[in-house]
Amino acid sequence: MSYRLEIEARSTDGKKDSDAEQALRDASATYRLRQAPPTDGEGLVRRLQADINPLLDALWGLGRYNAEIDVTVDGIPVTLDETDLAAAVHRAESFRNREIIPVKVVARLGPVFKLRTVDVDYPREMAPQRLPRRAFPLKSGDPAISADLRAAQLKLIDWFRSNGHPLAKVADVKASVDHAATAMDFRLRVEAGPKAGIGHVAISGSGDIDPRVVATHVHLREGEPYSPERLVLMKTSIARIPAIGGIRIREGDELDANGNVPIFIDVTERPKHAAGLSARYSTIDGPGVSSYYEHRNLFGNAERLRLDASASLLRRLDGSSSLNFGDIRASDFGGRFTATFLKPGLYGTPNDLLIEATAFRERVGNNDLGGYTNDAVRGTVGVIHRFSEMAWVQAGLQIERAQSQDVLGRVDATLIGVATSGRYDTTDNLLDPTRGVRLAATINAYSKLMGSTIDLYEARIAGSTYYALDEDANYVLAGRLAAGSLGGAPLARIPDAHRFFSGGGGSVRGFIFNTISPMMFGKIIGGRSLVEGSAEMRVKVTPTIGVVPFVDFGTASSSSLPNFDEYVGYGAGIGLRYLTPVGPIRLDVATPLNPRPGDSRWAVYVSIGQAF
C-alpha cells in the first residue's frame, strides 16, 4: 500500500528546523523504505510504531530531551499503545486501491538542553589541576548534544593514549537529565591503565610479499614509549613499499610480561602489474603523451621495475609554429624515457638498492627571452638508507652524457661522479600538509679524476614549513625557501640541465618555466646560484573548497654565491582547491608583478596536490 510521508519539526517559536527534520528522516525506517511499501494497513502502522522510539532518540541526540512526536495516518494517531492500533489500521485500509495514504510525523522540539555540571574522574597524576581543552573540550553551559558527548569521550581516550596509555578506556558514563530545568549533569570515569612501551611487532600478510622486507620499513624499537603517532608514521613507512596495497595495524588487548603492548601488522599485496597512458597539452610545451608500466613484485621480495615514457611536440625558440604538420621537423620532438629498479630491504637492512637510467630531450624558453635545448643520457646506481620514517639519505655513482645548445653555443660534457641526496619530512600529509617541516638537499661532485670532462660541484637545499592557525587546520600558513650553488667549471662549459633557472608552477608562478635567469645578448643563459621562495595562506572555506592567495619570488645569479644583483622575478595570484580524499585538486592563476618583454600576463596551473 503506497504512502506519502511528511516530516515536520518545529522549535518553540514555531519555526521549522531543517536540521531536526533531516535527523528524523535519517532515523525513520518508514522514510527509508518508502519505495517498498507494506502489503496492508497493519504492516504500515506497525512500521510507524517501530519508528517512534528511534525518532525520539534522534531528537535527544540533538539535545531536545523534552521533544514530543505525533505520528498520524490521515489524522488518526499512531502510538505505542496497542488499543489505538485498530483505528489507524482501519483508516489505512480505507485507502486501498483508491489513492496514496497520507502519513505525517510532527515533532515539537522544545528547548535545547545545556550541560549543567561536567565531571570527569581521571588519574590526577596525568593533569593535577584540570584536563587541557584539547583533551576534553566540554564545559558547563555547552549544548547537551549526544554526538558531542560521544566525540568528547573519544577525544579524551585519544589524549590518554597519546600520553603513553594504550589501554585507556571510559569505564563509566552517567548522564542525568533534569527536564524541568532543561539541563543535563554529565559524569564519566576514565581508567587510564598503565603507561606502556612498544612490544613485539608481528607481521603477517597475503600474497607473495616477504614479511622480512616489510620489517625493514618498521623503525619502532621494542621498549620505546608507546605513541599512536609513531604507529601512524610506521604505517606511512610501510606504505612506501610499492607492492603493498593494504595495511592493518592492531594493538594487543593486554600488556606483555615487560609492560609493553604487542603490535600486529597485516599487509595485503597490490596487483603485480600496472600500466597507464595519458595525453596532455601545455601552452608552453605543446601537446604530448605519456605512458608507464610497473611490475611491483618482480622477484618475490617487493622489487619494483618501472618504465616511464613520454613524448611531446616542443615549442620553437625562433617563434615559428610547428602546428602545421607539413612543417614539423625531427628537432621539434622531445621526450623522456626512464627505467627504474628498486629493491627494498637490501639484505634485511633498512637500505634500498636503486638503479635508474634516463634519456631525455627538452627545450625551454620563448622567442623574446631565448632558451636552451638539452639532450642527455644519465645512469645512477645508489643505495637509500632510511634512518627513520622521517629521514633518509641516498648515495651512489652517477654517469651522464649531456649536450646542450643556447646563446652561448653548444656544450658537450661527460659527467662521472658521486651523487648524494637526503630528505627529512615531519609533515602530516603528503599532498596537503598542514603541520610540520620538509627539508631536502642534494650534493653532486663530478671530477676529472673519475673520468669527467669537467670538474663540477653542485649543491641545492630546499625547505618548507606548515603551520595551522587553528586546531581543525582551516587556516594554514605555508612557506618555502630554496637555494643552490655550482662550483668548478666556468658557466659556458656546464650543460644547461645543470645550470640554475627559476620560474614556473613549482617555482615562481606567473613566469614561463625556467626563464628567470642571468642573460647575455638579451637571452637567458642560466646561473651558478639560485634563491627562490613562496608564501601561501591556505583557507578552507567549506569541507571541500579552499582558496589560497600566494606570492613567489626567485632569482638566478652568475656568481656561485646567491645574490640579488640580477633580475628577481616576483609573482602573485590566487588559487582554488577542491579537496578530495586523495588530495586537493589545484587551480592557480598567477601574474608576474614585474614582467619583462615576452612574459605572459597570466598563467594558469592545474595539478593534484598543493604547490609545495
Image (cartoon, grey):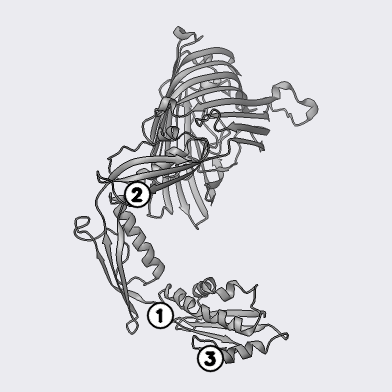
- 405 or 97: which is nearer to us? 97
Task: Measure how far apart labels 1 and 2 are at the Cα level.
Answer: 44 Å
Picture coordinates of residue 113, whole percent (x, y): 37, 77
The residue furthest front is 257
Question: Please, what secondary structure does the residue beneath circle 3 have?
Answer: helix
Picture coordinates of residue 64, whole percent (x, y): 42, 77
Packing grade of label 2 (10 A; few <14, some 14-19, many >=20) is some
Q: Residue at x 39, y 42 (%)?
A: 233
Camera-near label (3 vs 1) is 3
* Mark 2 lies on residue: 252
Question: Please, what secondary structure does the residue beneath circle 2 have?
Answer: loop
Task: Measure how far apart labels 3 and 1 are at the Cα level.
Answer: 29 Å
Query: Is residue 489 in view?
Result: yes
Task: Measure how far apart labels 2 and 3 are at the Cα level.
Answer: 53 Å
Image quadrant where residue 142 sits: bottom left
- Residue 93 relative to residue 547: left or right: right
Camera-near label (2 vs 3) is 2
Q: Residue at x 38, y 65 (%)?
A: 150
* Mark 1 lies on residue: 111
Packing grade of label 1 (10 A; few <14, some 14-19, many >=20) is some
Query: Is residue 393 in view?
Result: no
Q: Residue at x 43, y 73 (%)?
A: 62
Picture coordinates of residue 311, whole percent (x, y): 67, 29
